[in-house]
């Protein structure tokens, strides 16, 4: 007897799941670009991984796995930002009053970049985050459903805003 619970084929691990797990650093960076709160980042990452797990059977070309998973991550990140902007502002958390481990693990410059990127409009942030992951203009355009020229415009505007923020902080 196989056991008290039936086994369902759709519950088996997809053959590409180990490859998805190898993309964890890229997925984490994508999530960090949409959320600053470490606990909410973890929740968002779990939501992204679940959505990827559920969507893997619909992937047509395994060679496009990374763009596929990052598109899911960025779509969920964008939805997260939109839903968060509709919610009332939370009470600020005072880290000095609580023992909080640093789950970011990045340098001060990396943390500044994540914080600065959250100030960018969503359309600029998405393009910049994908470029930082190493995608070219056409790949970004395909993932976001826009033209390569529009990607160039968005990246230029994003860099201008980050440069202005950097200049403000240094003065």
Image (cartoon, rainbow, N blue to C red):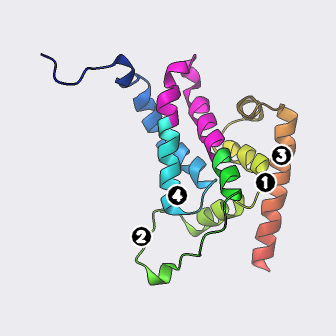
Q: Residue at x 70, y 63 (%)?
A: 116
The percent position of residue 41, horizontal first and vertical second, equals 53, 55
Residue that mark 2 sits on: 101
| C-alpha span from label 1 to label 2 | 29 Å
Q: Residue 90 occupies which quadrant of the picture?
A: bottom right
- Residue 149 position within the rendered picture, expressed as x and y whole percent measured from the top left: 87, 35
Q: Do the residues labelled 1 and 2 touch (CB within 8 Å)?
A: no
Q: How far across and how far down the image is residue 7, in percent? A: 28, 20
Q: Which of marks 4 and 2 is nearer the N terminus?
A: 4
* Tag 1 residue: 121
Q: Give the Cα separation between the discs numbered 4 and 1.
A: 20 Å
Magenta range is: 51-77
From the viewer's perspective, is the residue at label 3 or at label 4 nearer?
Answer: 4
For residue 10, which quarter of the picture?
Answer: top left
The mark that comes first in sequence, 3 or 2, is 2
Residue at image mark 4: 40
Q: In this view, does 93 lie above or below 115?
A: below
Q: Is 86 placed above or below 90 here?
A: above
Q: Nearer the viewer, mark 4 or mark 2?
A: 4
User: What is the residue that sits farthest to the bottom in this orientation?
Assistant: 97
Residue under label 3? 154
Q: Is mark 2 on a helix, strand or loop?
A: loop
The disc, 3 or 4, on the residue closer to the chain's N-terminal end is 4
């Amino acid at each position: 007897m196989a056991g008290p619970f039936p086994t369902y084929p759709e519950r088996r691990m997809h053959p590409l799941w180990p490859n998805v797990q190898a993309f964890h650093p890229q997925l984490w960076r994508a999530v960090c670009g949409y959320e600053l709160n470490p606990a909410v980042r973890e929740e968002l990452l779990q939501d992204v991984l679940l959505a990827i797990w559920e969507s893997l059977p619909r992937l047509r070309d395994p060679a496009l796995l990374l763009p596929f998973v990052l598109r899911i991550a960025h779509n969920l990140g964008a939805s997260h930002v939109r839903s968060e902007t509709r919610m009332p502002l939370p009470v600020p958390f005072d880290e000095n009053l609580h023992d909080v481990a640093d789950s970011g693990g990045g340098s001060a410059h990396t943390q500044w970049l994540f914080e600065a990127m959250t100030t960018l409009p969503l359309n600029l942030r998405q393009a910049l985050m994908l470029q930082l992951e190493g995608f070219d203009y056409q790949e970004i355009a395909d993932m976001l459903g826009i033209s390569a020229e529009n990607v160039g415009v968005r990246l230029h505007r994003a860099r201008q805003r980050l440069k202005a923020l950097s200049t403000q902080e240094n003065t």
